[in-house]
Amino acid sequence: MKEVTDDIYSRVRKVKFKRIGLDPSKKSNQGEKVDHCNSKKDKYDEHQHSVSFNSKSEEKKKKGEGRIITSNTTVQGFHTKFQQELKIGDYIEIEHPNTLIKESRQVVNIVSERTLIVDREFSFDLVSTSEYYYYTNDNDKDLDILNKSNTYSYREKDGMFKYKTVVKSVNSKLSREDILDIRAKKQRDKYCWI
């Protein structure tokens, strides 16, 4: 016959502790949890370059608008403004609701206002929406050049049998949505959405 315990959530805690690598039989797992989090963070720092959180980055850290969920390296936002707030090379920081570990990742690509891609996946995916913080990396001068201006080109009809290529520069980063809108306005590509 099995032992009856007063704690009705003990099975859930055992699974959670097993997932993050703690011993479910011990009552005081708080000290181990901190050590486990620190060792996990140290492993990530040694394996790949990470940003250490010092007082300067804490001052520059801003709360992002909206809430996010993650799946591997893709970050999906709800009521977010990624293109207005972030640029390529910035860092995004989250705190996992289950493990309370703070992690930061570098933004590799901003797809739209609601989607961006980070350099590597978080240790656990965010299933429920959570808040995020972002800060800029002032050390990368090459990223400033990439973010300053972009160009796009399209073909226009010039005469009876001629086409000319027109190159235009834009001050901000265009998403695929914006490029599709530009193409849809052109006479030649007005059916490009089909």
Image (cartoon, grey):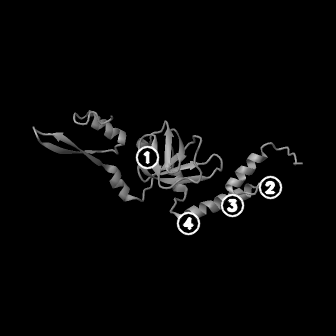
Q: Circle 1 is placed at which residue position?
A: 86
- Residues at marks 3 and 4, CA–CA distance in whole angstroms: 16 Å
Task: Give the x, y percent position of residue 104.
Answer: 53, 53
Q: Secondary structure at mark 2?
A: loop
Element assignment for label 1 = loop
Task: Report the residue marked by disc 4.
Answer: 46
Say if mark 1 contacts mark 2, CB within 8 Å.
Answer: no
Q: Are marks 2 and 3 in contact (CB under 8 Å)?
A: no
As drawn, 141 above or below 82 = below
Disc 4 + disc 2, Cβ < 8 Å: no
Image-based side of 161 in relation to 174, left or right:
left
Q: Quadrant of residue 153?
A: top left
Count the labels in the image: 4
Q: In this orientation, which residue lies closer to the viewer: 13 or 79?
A: 13
The residue positioned farthest toward the left in the image shown: 160
Q: Amino acid under label 2?
A: Ser
Residue positioned 22% across, 36% down in the render: 188
Local secondary structure at mark 3 = helix
Asked whether the residues under the numbered discs 1 and 4 touch, taking CB atoms below 8 Å apart as contact, a structural biologist would say no
Residue for badge 2? 25
In whole angstroms, how far apart are the C-alphas of marks 1 and 2? 44 Å
Q: Is 187 placed above or below 17 here?
A: above
> Which residue is label 3 attached to?
35
Label 4 element class? helix
Q: Nearer the viewer, mark 2 or mark 3?
A: 2
Mark 4: few, some, or many residues within 10 Å (few <14, many ≥20)? few
> On the picture, is 31 further left or further right than 59?
right
Quarter where residue 69 is shown: top right
Look at discs 1 and 2 and give the one toward the viewer: 2
